[in-house]
Amino acid sequence: NATKELAIEKTLEGIEETWRALDMDMVPFREGKEIYKLRSTDDVFAALEDNIVTLSTMKASKYFVVFETPINAWEQKLGLVSEVVEIVQKVQMSWMYLENIFVGSEDIRKQLPQESILFDSVNDSFAKYMLEMKTLQNVIKACTGSQPDPTPGVDNAMLERFTNMDEKLEKIQKSLENYLEKKRQQFPRFYFISSDDLLEILGQAKNPPNVQPHFKGMFEGIKKLEMTKPGTNGRKTFASTAMHSPDGETIPFNEPVITDGRPEEWLNDVEAAMYAACKKSLFETLTHSKGMKKEAW
């Protein structure tokens, strides 16, 4: 019996040794900014999986009563570590995606002012608490607010903070999806491209030529438009004068199309100009073909 109790005691010491040595793998998110991200969780989850199974086995032992306090303490701490690391990963993924949208595009911020304010709040909290986790270093300390030992008691503060951030980010994400859906309804060909590509297009209100790389996704037979810069022929805005196919064919528009402002608006004008140009080209082709032998035509 003493031998078996000693084995359990040694195993618990091994668990404590593991978690005293295990730190959060945090790295800077971007150079020049004191915002950190969680790089890898492989070691944490490997230790969790191994130790949680070990603790469960101990609880089934008839010697559990002797070690009930440390076993329950470790089980509580490791369970909380698992929850916190998972929610941090989830929040980090959502934050990284939305940070690129709300920090990088003034146009999106103007379109979604309330969501921008909400994201700024999450952004500040994320930076603050990721820095706190980086400073604490040790996984147990950072996730549970307790020491990496069998002393009972944990603090759920970090879990609650990141859960709150997750709820806010989900709300922002939903608003963003509704916003993109409205844009797709305004110009249905947006349904042919991904949300990431659509966001990139919507952020180019001041730079219409930057929409060009996405034309192949929206129009199967169009590679790019012939665009003229502001100042050409006395115009104050960008204008499109022709369309080019991937095969090198070109059809001029009947009239220059103003390609300025919100992309979903001028793209509708461009699409209408495409139909009109094709109609005119086909009519001219039919007219020229009359009275001529097919070979000569």
Image (cartoon, rainbow, N blue to C red):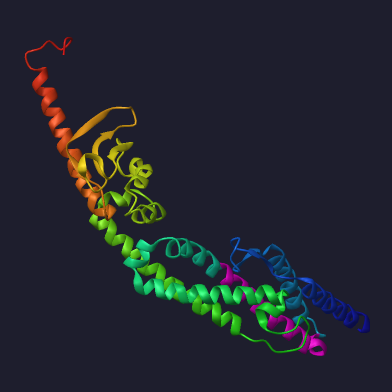
* Quadrant in the picture for residue 75: bottom right
Q: Position of residue 131 (x, y in %)?
A: 63, 74
Query: How many numbered discs sit on the rendered protein?
Result: 0
Residue sitting at the far right: 3
Q: Position of residue 31 (x, y in %)?
A: 61, 60
Q: From what the image shows, is residue 297 above or below residue 130?
A: above
Which image quarter is the C terminus in?
top left
Q: Which residues lie in the magenta part? A: 64-89
Q: Is residue 275 left or right of residue 119?
A: left
Q: Is residue 167 left or right of residue 244?
A: right
Q: Is residue 92 left or right of residue 102?
A: right
* Quadrant in the picture for residue 22: bottom right
Magenta region, main secondary structure = helix
Front residue of 291/241: it is 241
Q: Residue at x 67, y 72 (%)?
A: 134
Q: From what the image shows, is residue 217 above or below residue 1?
A: above
Q: Position of residue 36 (x, y in %)?
A: 61, 67
Q: From what the image shows, is residue 95 above or below residue 1?
A: above
Q: Residue at x 28, y 58 (%)?
A: 183
Q: Residue at x 37, y 66 (%)?
A: 109
Which image quarter is the N terminus in?
bottom right
Q: Is residue 213 magenta?
A: no
Front residue of 137/49: it is 137
Q: Is residue 77 magenta?
A: yes
Q: Position of residue 248 (x, y in %)?
A: 32, 27
Residue sitting at the far left: 291
Q: Residue at x 45, y 75 (%)?
A: 168
